[in-house]
Amino acid sequence: MKRRLSLLSAAILPLFAASSIAYAEDGELEKIEVTGDFKRESIQTLSASASLFSDHEINQRGAKFLDEMLASAANVNFTSGASRGRFVQIRGVGLRSQFVDPINPSVGLVIDGINYSGLGGSSLLFDIDQVEIYRGPQGTRFGADALAGMIQMESATPTLDPSVKIQLGAGNYNSYEAGIAAGTGITDDTAVRASIYQRESDGYVENRYLGEDTQQQDELVSRFKLHSQLTEHLRTELNVHYIDINNGYDAFTLDNSRYSVADEPGQDNQESIAVGLANIYTGFDFFDVSLNLSGIDSELLYSYDEDWVCNDEAQPELCAAGLHDWGYSSTDAYFRDRQDQAAELQFSGKSGEWVAGIYYQGREVDLERQYTWLAQPFASNYETSNIAAYGQLATPIGPKTTLITGLRVEQYQGDYTDNNGFIEETDDVMVGGKLALEYQVIDRTMIYTSITRGYKAGGINSEALAKAKDEGLNLDADFFANHTSFAPEYLWSGEFGVKGSSLDDKFMLRLAAFYMYREDMQLKSWQVEGQKFTGYIDNASSGENYGLEIEGSFQATDNLLLTGSAGYLHTEINDFVAQSGLDQDGRDQAQAPKYQYAFTARYNFTPALYASIGVEGKDDYYFSDSHNSKAPSSNLVNASFGYESDNWSINAWARNLFDEDVPTRGFEFGNDPLDGYTTHTYTQLGEPMVAGVTFIYEL
């Protein structure tokens, strides 16, 4: 049996190699660990499907933001509908947008131990040491924010030795970047590291009416870390983040091109200050204890020109007669103030064999919507609090077999009020957990099987509440009155995995097969009348998702490294009819391509000089669960050429080398008065061919 598994690994690896394996500049394997299952361990021993990207891989790809890395991970997709792809789907499960309604994320985001879930604009990659993507429900570890999975980002750790990192770059679309990070020890027991990074770009849309860059990117992130061993047994870790995003949002056009004529383009802004404090005490004989505190204060603005066109008789070539005369001119803007607080008290065994803890999270969101069609701005307040108790135990049941049992119980409460006089409450108690068997076949090969249960809290359809009252819109008020809230969703997942590597680490494999059952599946739907539309979330009966993920690496020769990933995904909606009457029973779920792949070959001409070329692609997929428009299949080519010395590197890179148009968001409705508001599919295009040069100096 052992020999068969080793032969299977060796046969598959050259065909399926994964970019989540990190190699140093000299070709030696970097020993990188993950923390997704309560303890620090190799990704090769984790009983879950996961991808890992090191800073070296991020830099080689020229990635500046998380969405520019996601295509390298199996069965991971994203949508835009904003200036960036900040809504992530894993195995076909995840949000696609946010408008009025307060929503709960399906895929969580944690940066330096601070929960940024629902704040996807925070995921800038400068001075990030590694990105970890966990697929499948993480019910025990992360709770209500991780129904489909979790993304963790960890910035560089302070060291007692002085360190400096300088990053400079420039590229097409007038893009440039500049970042500096520095750290040092300030006492024998305390080290600090601070970084600041600024990036700007004209963006990928030309507004011909205004003659301005209205999809521009202007992004700044600054981080500060302090690690201190206060006593022999007490350690403290402080993280402070400042994020300032001032991006334009002018992505949709009547002809689905990159040339806008909007006279009132929107914005996609975020300003956040976050603080995290972790205290770890190891002085007890039988267990360690940690207390983690964090808070985030964010101001967010999301706005857009709803009609996408201009109104200027002096420029008939751009503002065709009738665009506004027949129709409408409107803007929509969402101002949010959001405050998050979290506290976690955790106890763990000295050998990591058990963990138990309690967790609290509070979140308050104040929304003001300024919309042309409202008599006055819409204002709402939504406060949520969740309290959880959890535990996990690793029990050896043989010399090579370990049983993992985990359980999490969480109470999630929500209080909603708005200036229409609506007051609503939700109170859900949800249970998730993990049951897994890990079998170490040989030292470098393990197999696992697991059953996990994740959950996602219910919520309020605040836009439906407002529209039920607003008779002037002539929408189905009775329908919305009966859809003021929606129930929690639960996800059961069964998974079988194989992970292994050769003795010399030239072959490495991770394979996972999974089946997921979604109970009371939450689906976003739309009620449309003319150019007025209302979004709401409804519960379908159930859904099914199953598939396969393969990631690995193959050091074919001393100079040639092959890496890549491949994923297969089948999804299905059960018993759901949209408000339009469209029966979606048996259809694929939205944002769920049947296949995805990413393969890269890197060749070292010398120990310092290298070139790489990669290809990535995905099948076509539905944009939404409420209509049947699709994104087409895509196949993109990426390349890089660089020089890496001991202290500095320079990398010329390009993504989407052949400038393919790839939609990242799509809607189906009528928005053009010149054709009588005939229904069309309107899409937002992802990044075109982007290229640049990045210089990094590290000491």
Image: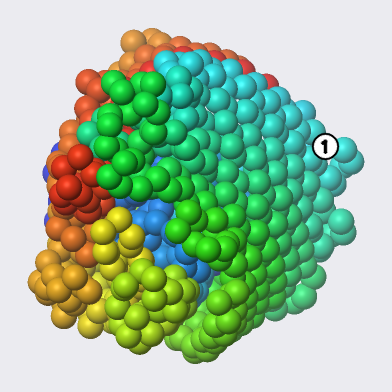
Residue at image position (87%, 56%) is 230
Tell which of 469 and 184 is nearer to you.
469
Q: The C terminus lies in which quarter of the figure?
A: top right
Is 264 displayed left or right of 129 in the figure?
left
Residue 404 in the image: x percent, y percent? 42, 77
Residue 469 in the image: x percent, y percent? 44, 79
Q: Is residue 601 visible?
A: no
Residue 409 in the image: x percent, y percent? 51, 86
Q: The N terminus lies in which quarter of the figure?
A: bottom left
Residue at image position (57%, 22%) is 177
* Residue 388: quadrant of the picture: bottom right
Residue at image position (57%, 27%) is 199
Tell which of 517 and 54 is nearer to you.
517
* Mark 1 secondary-structure assignment: strand
Q: Is residue 689 above or below residue 631?
A: above
Is 426 displayed left or right of 579 in the figure?
right
Q: Is residue 561 above or below residue 362?
A: above
Q: Which residue is mark 1?
A: 185
Q: Amino acid at mark 1?
A: Gly
Number of residue marks: 1
Q: Is residue 168 above or below residue 118?
A: above
Tell which of 518 and 613 is nearer to you.
518
